[in-house]
Amino acid sequence: MVFSPFISSILFEPTDSTVRSSFSYSKAEIRVRIMYSQQLILALSTVLTFLPLGLSATLPFGHYGPEGTVLFLNGFHFVSGHSDWEISANHYCVIIADDILQCAVYNTATTPARLAGIEYIITTEAFETLDYEERQLWHSHVYEITSGFLIEPGLPSSVDHTIMKDVLVGTYGKTFHTWRYDQQNSSYPIGIPELVMGYTGDDQITPDFVTKRDEMFGVNTTEIRESRCDIPPPPVLAGADSWKYGFVLSLGIVNQTSNTSFPSHDEKQAVLS
């Protein structure tokens, strides 16, 4: 599965009702929208259709905003080592290449919304190329999708189902939050970034937490779960969801003495930015 041609074929030929539904939310706290007008969607679909796969990471791909965002998702995270630190996270996702998306992650519990962190989403084929030390930083998305936890607010159910079944169910995510859970009420992002993980089974998340999310977006996770019962769950590759093996991964600051002077201009290597 590659992201760019497939998502373009799903999202970029909307009916009038599809466009209207993406702007139908009236709740003040829901400030997320599918940011495309019909003209922009059709124009971008034409670009995607004829763009060689090797060039799919060139502009405007990789940039957030109306000219870049292709998916808006809401799902649940928990902090590595703290299964009781539950987070409802909004994701604005853009295409980087054929096998990777990057998502800006916001915590729905704060007003104004704060940028919580970043999630990278890769295909099964990309995950297979990672060594096992790297794999422990990634979580699977299978259960998030079959459970109905991962949603696409504002999209028609048929479009949501197709994206979940044919694009996302076999993917893996690597997520770091720079605005820590235990500092979410602070005025500034204090502390060291933390690794967050995804849920993999029933009875792991507090039911009331899911209910509150559903009320916010006007959805029903139970009904979504039932509608996805025909999505076959692919096997989770070894190394993902490392918390299930009892591993708690966290970051730390390492202070060491070193030469902190800058090299002379003659010693510097030119780097194009």
Image (tube, helix red, strand yellow):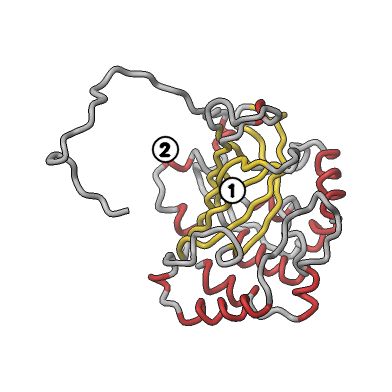
Q: Is residue 169 left or right of residue 265?
A: right
Q: Can see residue 123?
A: no
Q: Is residue 37 left or right of residue 24?
A: left
Write the residue at 53% across / 54% down. 102
Mark toward the start of the polypeptide (2 vs 1):
2
Per the image, the residue denoted by label 2 is 133
Q: Amino acid at mark 1?
A: Ser
Kind of element beneath mark 1: strand
Q: Farthest residue in the front direction?
A: 265
- Of helix, strand and loop, which one carries label 2? helix
Q: For the residue marked with disc 2, what is the amino acid?
A: Glu
Q: Which residue is mark 1?
A: 140
Residue at 55% x, 25% y: name it. 191
Residue 58 versus residue 249 in the image, above or below: below
Q: Position of residue 97 (x, y in %)?
A: 45, 63
User: Closest to the observer: 71 or 29?
Assistant: 29
Residue ID at (65%, 66%): 163
Residue 3 spot, x, y in % from top left: 53, 66
- Label 2 crowding class (10 Å Cα cut-off): few <14, some 14-19, many 20+? few
Q: Nearer the viewer, residue 181 or 33?
A: 33
